[in-house]
Amino acid sequence: MGKDVIIACDFPNAGETLKFLEKLGAERPYVKIGMELFYGEGPEIVKTLKERGHKIFLDLKLHDIPNTVGRAMKVLDGLDVDMCNLHAAGAKAMMEAARENFRGTLIGVTQLTSTTEEVMREEILINRSLTEVVTEYGRNCLCTGLNGVVCSPLEAGMIHEACGDDFLTVTPGVRLAGDAAGDQRRVTTPAKARELGSDYIVVGRSITAAEDPLAAYRKCREEFVG
Ligand code: C5P
């Protein structure tokens, strides 16, 4: 599986998304559609971007009872997206139901990269180390047939160690050197993410908020893919 840079299109509507993508010229990057854009525009935005030649990661982070998630995944499967995800905290029966209904690349969210261990222990009430939680969730994803996890690049190595080299690590929390971290708590550069063994990096603001998004995208690719 080739490494790639996925651009997080965290825009409120199709108009702004297309305006942004036009700045990338002839490039047709892998894009991530998140809650904001999908809830605002619905499945039509998936269709529009697919028709323009983009691969799609639909980042809706499902988490509900197995029956509900299974049925929702069947709908997402019908949209023919390349990748989608769910919360590993939803547990194995939910992940199995999702896997049965979605044929594309299915990945589990371990802990959001905005979460610190302190917050996880005191507010999410999981009184274990972040490392332990991320690897255990990774194993649960692997044994329920998922293709990989969303995790911090800093966790990519231990995930591969626990779950194998073919198990994908899709890693947000990436910033070009010098860019603001914003709300992310654990960030690395694309070059560092490559060194750490990430398979895909998800980059939002370092590209979308850049003065020259095309140059920022190319820089991410150059550092990460080579
Ligand atoms: O702008 P930035 O590069 O921080 O965007 C990161 C993207 O990755 C956002 O769309 C965010 O929702 C997503 N994400 C994340 N951490 C996760 C899973 C997804 O930051 N664990």
Image (tube, rainbow, N blue to C red):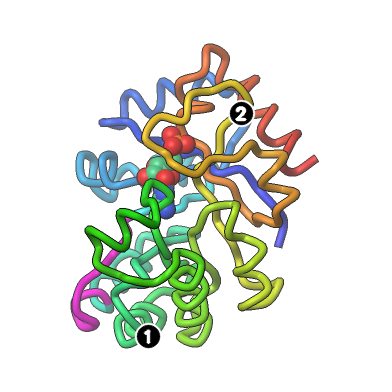
81 to 69, vertically: above or below: above
Q: Earlier in the sequence, mark 2 or mark 1?
A: 1
What SS does tag 1 mark? helix
Q: Is residue 42 visible?
A: yes
Instruction: Out of 99 and 75, give the one closest to the viewer.
Output: 99
Q: Is residue 63 magenta?
A: yes
| Horizontal relation, residue 28 to residue 16: left or right | right
| Residue at which label 1 appears | 96
Instruction: Out of 122 and 30, give the one closest to the viewer.
Output: 122
Q: Amino acid at mark 1?
A: Glu
Q: Position of residue 39 (x, y in %)?
A: 21, 45
Please identify the quadrant where the N terminus is shown: bottom right
Q: Nearer the viewer, mark 2 or mark 1?
A: 2
Residue 168 found in image quarter: bottom right
Please identify the quadrant where the C terminus is shown: top right
Q: Is residue 113 magenta?
A: no
Q: Is residue 33 visible?
A: no
The boundaries of the magenta stretch are: 60-69
Q: Residue at x 47, y 30 (%)?
A: 181
Residue 87 found in image quarter: bottom left
Instruction: Out of 21 and 67, give the one closest to the viewer.
Output: 67
Say which mark, if any, is on residue 176: 2
Q: Amino acid at mark 2?
A: Leu
Q: Position of residue 187 (x, y in %)?
A: 53, 40
| Horizontal relation, residue 105 to residue 2: left or right | left
| Horizontal relation, residue 33 to residue 174: left or right | left
Assign ligand 1 to one image quadrant: top left
Q: Residue at x 61, y 28 (%)?
A: 176
CB at disc 1 and ligand 1 closer than 8 Å? no
